[in-house]
């Protein structure tokens, strides 16, 4: 049974995965879209329910991983966002949708970060977009912490 196989994995390794998948999702958007973190979080919840994993540790790793991923995503956007945008085709960066998305993230960063946590595509893109849009670091960090806790 899958549950028994998951329970055979050492708790430290499971907790590491619970940290790494939420971290990778916003830090590495393409990977994050391919390996959504909800899978690891649901599995850790099942393991915690059956006593194979300490629930407080699973929650802590999930929150820390989500926060670390957002921080890395923001730093990537801040550092390389303009360069990445310059390498996109003009039909993308010149499109009304792209301009609207960047404006919305910059103007409504609180909503973008908080609501983005609950949508797989936005969860992977919003941190990088916030960094590229110049959302202040302290504001982004506070919002990321709140959204990660939620």
Image (cartoon, rainbow, N blue to C red):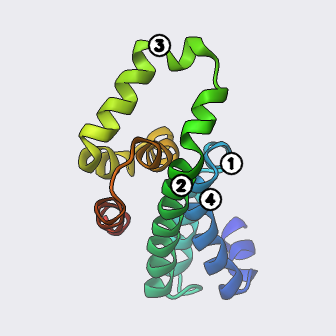
The mark that comes first in sequence, 4 or 3, is: 4
The mark that comes first in sequence, 2 or 4, is: 4
Whether pointer 3 and pointer 2 mark residues with C-beta atoms closer than 8 Å, the reply is no
> Residue 12, image x and y in percent?
67, 87
Q: Residues within 10 Å of mark 1 (few under 14, many from 20)?
A: some
Marks 3 and 1, how far apart at CA: 25 Å
> Residue 82, image x and y in percent?
55, 37
Whether pointer 1 and pointer 4 mark residues with C-beta atoms closer than 8 Å, the reply is yes
Q: Which residue is mark 2?
A: 73
Whether pointer 1 and pointer 2 mark residues with C-beta atoms closer than 8 Å, the reply is no
Q: Which residue is mark 3?
A: 95
Disc nearest the viewer among 2 and 4: 2
Marks 3 and 2, how far apart at CA: 23 Å
Is label 3 in a helix, a strand or a loop?
loop
Q: Residues within 10 Å of mark 4 (few under 14, many from 20)?
A: many
Does 125 appear above or below 75?
above
Marks 4 and 3, how far apart at CA: 28 Å
Is label 1 in a helix, a strand or a loop?
helix
Q: Quadrant of residue 108?
A: top left
Residue 58 tag number: none
Whether pointer 3 and pointer 1 mark residues with C-beta atoms closer than 8 Å, the reply is no
Q: Which residue is mark 1?
A: 31
> Residue 80, image x and y in percent?
60, 46
Q: Which residue is mark 4?
A: 24
């Amino acid at each position: 049974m899958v549950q028994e196989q998951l329970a055979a994995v050492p708790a430290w390794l499971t907790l590491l995965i619970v940290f790494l998948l939420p971290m990778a999702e916003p830090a590495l958007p393409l990977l994050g879209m391919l390996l959504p973190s909800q899978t690891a979080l649901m599995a850790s919840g099942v393991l915690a329910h059956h006593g194979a994993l300490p629930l407080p540790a699973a929650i802590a790793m999930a929150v820390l991983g989500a926060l670390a991923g957002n921080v890395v995503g923001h730093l990537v956007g801040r550092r390389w966002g303009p360069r990445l945008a310059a390498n996109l085709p003009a039909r993308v960066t010149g499109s009304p949708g792209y301009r609207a998305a960047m404006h919305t993230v910059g103007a409504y960063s609180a909503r973008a970060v908080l609501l983005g946590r609950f949508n797989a595509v936005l969860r992977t893109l919003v941190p990088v977009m916030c960094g590229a849009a110049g959302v202040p670091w302290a504001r982004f960090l506070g919002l990321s912490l709140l959204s990660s806790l939620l």
